[in-house]
Structure formats: C-alpha cells, structure tokens
Amino acid sequence: MVASHPPPYISQSVRTIKVRYSSTGGGTNIPVSYANLANMLGLVCTGAGTTVYLSNVFRLRRVTLWAPTTAGVNATLSLSWVENTADYESPPSTHTDNSISPEHPAFVDVRPPKGSLADKWHGSAQTDNCFQMSYVASTTMDLTFEFVINDLNATLVAGPSPFSAPASGVIGHLRFNANFFVVALKDI
C-alpha cells in the first residue's frame, strides 16, 4: 500500500557518542560535575571567546577506566556516584580496582545506578556533581553519552569561554581538569 503523504518521524533523535580521554597525571577524589561532562561531550564555538553546548540535555550511560602499572607498582582506580540531595535515589556506591601486574591493568566499567540521579537526563549547565574519581597517570577514560543536537530553533545554552579562540563553528571537547585530554571520538 502506498502512503498518501510522507510518514511522521522524530526530528531530533537521541544520538550516542563515546569520548576517550587520557590522563597525564593522577588525582584523588576529584569531582566531576554535569557541566564538566557537557564540556567533555562538546562545545560549539560561536565567536571569539564564546561557546554554546553541543546539546542542551544529555545523559551519561557508561564510564570505563583503565590504569596501567609497572612491575611492583600498584595502580588503583576508583569511581563513586554522588547524590546531591538529602534523599538518596539509590544507595551510594564506589567501584574500585587495583592492578599489581603490567599484564592486567586496573579496570573499572560502570553505568549509573538504575533510577539514580546520574541515570537521568541533565541540563548541560548544571553544576551538581555526578561522580568523583581517583586515578593514576596514564589512565584512559571512556565516557558514553546519549544526547540530542541543538537544532530546529532550540534555545542554545551558553558554554564556558574557551582558553583559546577557535574559529566559529568548530566543535571542541574540554578537559574537566588539567590532567585529562581528549584522544578519540566514536559515534555509536
């Protein structure tokens, strides 16, 4: 049967991306806010020193960490989900792994606890903390996000001023601190 008109469709579909970061140094109990995550997901430069978030809303689907070690040196990774209210939506949880051998790096692979605040959609400018982490130098971190691109006349949310002024229209992925830098992106 031939349709008499074009079928309806979802014009702003949910997209998934994995962003890989690598660290040059270590840190202990370092907080990561939703705004930090939105900066890591992506910013679009709109002019000299101005940006907007690639997406007004996103949710974190997964965090994966690997930490190498050398013989006789212990490498430890830790990630704790943070609740920001007095009423917890899920029990607090911390995920930790240690490596004492170069053949088996420390490895943490977690998803936000089901029903927790971290499992929900968040505004890109939200400054509450999502998780805190401890890591060593040379840690690799993969962040998997779901997001909707701001097109179709959405009100754009202003992002932070970049440290340097890339050309207008360029998409950048900021660090959440001085230790981590982006090394790869993959659409899923």
Image (cartoon, rainbow, N blue to C red):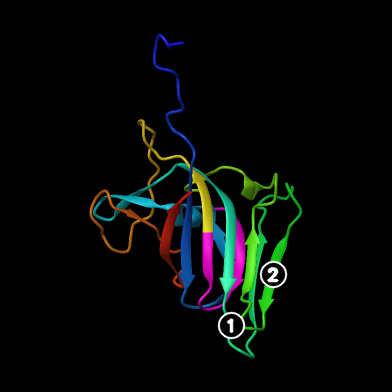
Overall secondary structure of the magenta section: strand
Give the percent coordinates (x, y) of residue 179: 46, 73
Is label 1 in a helix, a strand or a loop? loop
Q: Residue at the location (73% across, 46% down)? A: 89
Q: Residues within 10 Å of mark 1 (few under 14, many from 20)?
A: many
Q: Quadrant of residue 26?
A: bottom right
What amino acid type is highlighted by mark number 2? Thr
Q: Earlier in the sequence, mark 2 or mark 1?
A: 1
What amino acid type is highlighted by mark number 1? Thr
* Cα–Cα span, label 2 and label 1: 15 Å
Q: Residue at the location (46% across, 39% down)? A: 148
Q: Residue at the location (49% across, 38% down)? A: 14
Give the percent coordinates (x, y) of residue 81: 66, 58
Q: Is residue 4 left or right of residue 165?
A: right
Residue designated by label 2: 96
12 shown above or below 87: above
The circle on residue 121 is none
Q: Is residue 182 visible?
A: yes
Q: Residues within 10 Å of mark 2 (few under 14, many from 20)?
A: some
Residue designated by label 1: 69
Write the start and end of the magenta stretch as one range. 127-142
Q: Is residue 30 visible?
A: no
